[in-house]
Amino acid sequence: MKRWRRLLLHGGALLSTLGLLSGVFFFLGHIVLKGMPSLSLALIFGDTSPLKALLFTQRVFNGLFPAICGTLCLVLLSVVLALPAGILTGVWLSHFGSGRAKALLSLCIDTLAGVPSIVVGLFGFSFAILLHKISHGTVGPSLGIAALTLSVLVLPGIVRNTQLALAAIPRETHLAVSAMGATPVQAIVRVYLPMASPGIFRGAILAMGRCAEDTAAIMLTGVVATAGAPYALFGRFEALPFAIFTIASEYSGPEELAQGYGASLILLLLCALLFGLSALIASRFHPDTP
Amino acid sequence: MIKARRRPHEWIGEGAAATAALITFALTLAIFGFMGWLAMPLLQGETLTTLFTSVWRPDRGQFGILPMAWGTLAVALPATLLAFPLSLGFACFATHLAPRRLRKTLKGLAGLMTGIPTVVYGFSAVFLLVPLIREMAGRGSGFSIIAAVLVLALLISPTMILILISAFEAVPQPWQRCFDSMGATPEETVWHLLFPLATRSMVGALLLGLGRAIGDTLIALMLAGNAVLAPTDPFGPARTLTSHIGLVMAADVESLEFRSVFACGLLLYLLIFVLTLLVRYLTRRPAA
Amino acid sequence: MKLTFNDLSFRYKTHTILQAVSLEVPKGSLTAITGPSGEGKSTLLSIVNHLWRPDEGARVSGDAMARFDSGVINLLSPHLDLPSLRRKAAMVFQNPVPLPFSIFKNVALPLAFAGIRKKEEVHRRVERALIRSGLWNEVKDRLHDRAALLSGGQQQRLALARALVTDPEILLLDEPTSSLDATSREHIEAQLLTLKTHCTLLLVSHSEAQVERLSDRIYQLKAGNLKRMR
């Protein structure tokens, strides 16, 4: 290879690496620099006393507390909804499914993984409208519907992670467990799933990160700018990413803007925490993967 | 003795797994079904023809979604074309060209980048990139196609990088050592071994990146300006299919304007389905 | 348990692995099958506990009967209850395959599969299996350590205990010592000789010396043909 072509390739690779990393640092550095000063208890609780807010005896009006609570509820609810279905689907794909049915479901999961979150949100919305008609107006876009929508969004990720973790179990183990007189279901429940649990857990944490950051899907399924802390499964709610989105488009003054930066930083830290955790699990159990 | 018998836990367990699989399958179809069902009133008769025009005048019963389709193309395509070479460079650097000590860190950084919330990028760009573009262009508000393209490129590259890295690492080690033993420089290994062997995966990464760019809502919604115009000027605004859905949803539920949103959803779903099929075709394992 | 094979042939896709072989394993004996590696000795073993899968391109013909205490069964029948069969015909592999659980749980797992849940009984049988495999004295104080912490030889004896815990009538041993050092090998060999009072043993080994030392009956498998040597 000619010298100038080698230099071009090397230089190009170096420049694109630096370009991407500096782009990330450019945008995130801005958030960190502007967000740091506004991080305080007042950012979260506003004028309310933290203790009263945490005990839900007093409503927080100008802090992020309701949005943070909303996001936490959303994350927990949707992962709890998505995990059983996702794990069982993964088990079916790697142990029971065969032939065309397996290929078809695999295609479905790839498709579902690519469907834009706003389209999934639209699905959640139309589902809520349907429920609204059936239930004569008691159920509509709400926390429960949003969690359901997000669980559809993260389902394919959980399925794929379960499948990968199960596929990593060596054939030797399968033979040994069969030779011990285990029926297929006994082997899955007592041996394979415990062995795959780090990988499945990692998938669940990635799903939590996705639920915490997604805005488009909840935008259509019941999130609002002011609702207070989540009060009912079928009530409107606030969420951190939506709060950031609203502030970016309709902020009324420097105070709200500072709150936006603070909220962005909190969300960023939350996602970094979840991702760090999943990377830790990955390196703990599979030292080869980054 | 030892006759085959079905233990109850066997069919309960297998039944539960099969039920979950069926639910997942049904969900995928249901999303398509709901879009089609709710878009139906628009897909019949005259309105179908107005759907594929460029006139969006809901007050006059004209629901052309073509400007939005062009908007999606104008934002997603340049973003993918910008992000792909950058991601390719990053992946080459992180797997073969960087000093060994750096490689693991770079791979880890790429993984972390996938976790950065979209809305945080959007928020940062509204106050950092948009004013910059306004000044550079000397006209308009700065909320423009180019702003969306730049941030979107940054958003989709980690996904592409991770696919490319795993494709490069799937190239058998012995072949790479063989190249080393022949005295090939790392650049030559990349050019003559990795690129030819990973071509299909590279196209797959490109298409998956395109899919993510098409599907992204927040960046376009926050940065692209959202005017219903056929996009012509990179410093001008555009509205994508996704942000169109987000913007119209506030309106009243029985109007035809509202129905057009489901036509957008249907179009997006089909686009993604075709991309998925293509990616699967490209990255399927060659028959043994 | 007594095992009788008659005119048994085994084909895998287009390869013939066993060509009309006949074999008799008397009750309470240690019968060995020896021969070059890759000649289908393991296949012969896998017929006894039905560990081969008919849907993977394998075709069997002939007779393979096993006389258990509770009656005679046809090992080639497609209607066998495999879990019960595998509890009666337990297997030890070349590699110990310790599962990522505690020592105790590794041995107790087959009992759980068999539906035995009474705590005292599980404890009693795990202890008995560990004593029979000669591992009890080394692990009795650390039953709740992870099995992966044991040495290679100890792991293989753990696998032996795991096979013995369901009181099998025949023990299938697939090169049980070939991945071990000399000391561990002797340890296991000594243990195998004491086991003959509890069950029938069928050993596959490529080591002629080992086979000479241990066996009552020796067969050699070469090019698909089985020949009685002793």
Image: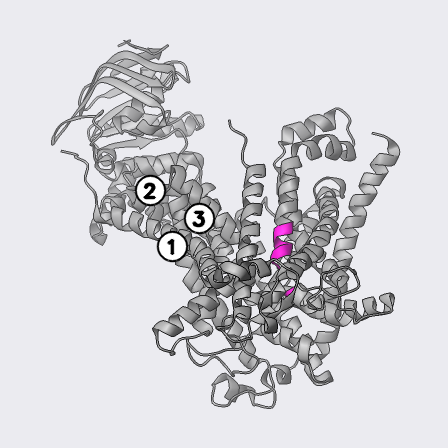
Residue C139 visible to the viewer:
yes
Question: Residue C136's x, y, as percent?
Answer: 32, 42
Q: Is residue A270 left or right of residue C167?
A: right
The stretch drawn in magenta includes residue B110: no
Q: Nearer the viewer, mark 1 or mark 3?
A: 1
Question: Residue C179's x, y, as percent?
Answer: 44, 28
Q: Is residue B178 left or right of residue C161?
A: right
Q: Are the two marked residues, 2 and 3, in contact with CB atoms closer than 8 angstroms? A: no
Q: Is residue B258 left or right of residue B18?
A: right
Question: Mark 1 highlights which residue?
Answer: B23
Residue A281 visible to the viewer:
no
The kind of residue tagged 1 is Ile
CA–CA distance in space, label 2 to label 1: 52 Å
Question: Residue B116's x, y, as percent?
Answer: 64, 62
Specify the principal SS of the magenta part.
helix
The subunit letter for the residue under badge 1 reads: B
- Work out whether residue A102 or residue C218 is closer to the camera in this orientation and state it: A102
Q: What SS does tag 1 mark?
A: helix
* Residue in the picture at 77% in, 32% down: B188
Tell me where residue B145 sits by quadrant.
Answer: bottom right
Tell me where residue C27 sits by quadrant.
Answer: top left
Q: Which mark is residue C137?
A: 2
Question: Mark 3 highlights which residue?
Answer: A196
The kind of residue tagged 2 is Asn
